[in-house]
Amino acid sequence: MSSSSSSSQAILFGITSFVAGGLAMRMMMSSKSSKNKEEDASSLLPATAQYRTKSPPISYPTYDYLNQPKESFIQICDMLINELLDDLTLNYKLPQRERDYLYKMLQYNVKGGKMNRGRMVVDAGVAILKENNSEIDNTTLCRLAVLGWSVEWLQAWLLIADDIMDSSVTRRGQPCWYKTLDDAWYIAINDAVTIESLVYKMIKRHFGYDPMLCYSILDLLTETTLQTELGQLCDTMCDVLTLQDLTPERWNYIVKYKTSFYSFYLSVALAMMFLGGKTQKEVYDVARDILIEMGIYFQAQDDYLDCYASPEVLGKIGTDIADKKCGWLFTKAYHELLEKDGDGKKLLDAQYGKCKVGTKEEQSIKELYTELGLPKLYEDYEKASYDKIRSFKESTKVATILSEAGIPWEIFEIFLQKVYKRSK
């Protein structure tokens, strides 16, 4: 299956879930019967009723946000994996061998990393609750964590697909998932879209008690997925474009859509949606503006680290030069710093996207970047980006909108401090 085919299949899953969620919401809201939930589900969604049995009640573990925030977050993932696999066994008659495979696949891919995106949902939620003097109970913390894991699982399936398309070797300090499957690497394509489908399953199970909220969450997740895939399309299209086409404008579009929406805006928007039921468009607009700017800075930082950070610190082998990425360093060098017919541009024309990782040709490009002063330019860019993001806090209009909606600036400060001057 080609990468474009995989992307189309993933979008189809998203659209299907979006339509199903919208239909369910409209039908549930129009229903005036007082039948139990199982009967309602079967009558409102008869086409899929045979795949549902009475699910056991949800029993959340104790969430110790103050003393064991990371451990508590991880145990919610364990809960989700077990209950989703139980559902596949019970309702889809999944054979034991395939269940065991999915367990291994999920353990390998959805856990690990810094978990900043997922844990940010919980942190943002707690900040909103404190700002509004609301009770922080165990169920609310666990549901925030479920939303956090929906972001982490979304990240997981996107990374599986991204690693295949980029022919990456390592991810988070271990072999990429498709690499572990040897000649059957193509199974990882199905694994990616399976994880996406399971995200929608978990949302319907844990937020189906409120049809409008459930629909809103599914709407946000599917919209974010599409935005990310559009960014990925523009990224992978670079493989067939000339270096002249890899412009700063193209880089800006790629990082906004491929990174900023799902890595920054999604986490905060989910917390806002779940806790506040915020309906004012301007509140989301302000949050989006701040977080998109943060995401663009984050990706420039990622591009810089791909070149200059060691694999041991970064957790992966940098491949942007060999992969012909439309990255921050390249666009600066090629379109802004090098003379049209100079030796530096000739070097990039001859080797960028054509050399292999770890070769002297790749190293010569890294040395060119250094000679052009790109480390210092990046340092200046990082400071300017930080100041621009902090300037939102000084805006009277922004402060008023956030304050009236009960959204503290602390949310954005937490995110900014997690990524500013990071080393991996």
Image: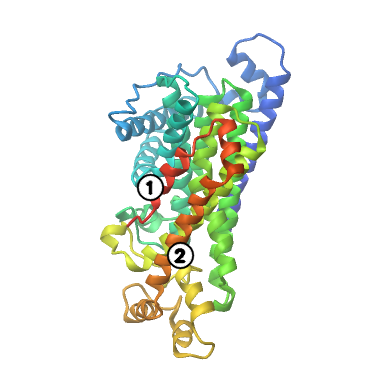
| Mark 2 surroundings within 10 Å by alpha-carbon count, few (fewer than 14), some (14 through 19), many (20 or more) | some
Task: State the residue position of label 2.
Answer: 381
User: In screen coordinates, is 73 left or right of 207?
Assistant: left
Viewer-nearest residue: 186 or 131: 131
User: In screen coordinates, is 7 left or right of 88?
Assistant: right
Residue that sits furthest to the top in the current view? 34
Which quadrant of the figure contains the C terminus? Answer: bottom left
Residue 407: give x, y in percent of width and height: 53, 34
Q: Is residue 348 above or below residue 397?
A: below
Residue 189: give x, y in percent of width and height: 48, 51
Q: In this view of the protein, can residue 1 be seen by the observer?
A: no
Query: What label does residue 310 carry, if any?
Result: none
SS at mark 1 in the image: helix
Q: Is residue 30 above or below residue 104?
A: above
User: In screen coordinates, is 364 left or right of 199?
Assistant: left
Q: CA distance from mark 1 to mark 2?
A: 18 Å
Residue drawn where x is 45% and y is 55% of the image: 386
Viewer-nearest residue: 275 or 224: 275
SS at mark 2 in the image: helix
Quadrant of the image occupied by residue 220: top right
Mark 1 or mark 2: whose residue is earlier in sequence:
2
Inspect the image, locate mark 1, and give the three-letter code of the amino acid beneath it: Lys
User: What sort of colour scheme is used for the picture?
Assistant: rainbow
Residue drawn where x is 42% and y is 22% of the image: 136
Residue 152: give x, y in percent of width and height: 44, 42
Residue drawn where x is 54% and y is 51% of the image: 292
Task: State the residue position of label 1.
Answer: 418
Q: In this view of the protein, can residue 226 be seen by the observer?
A: yes
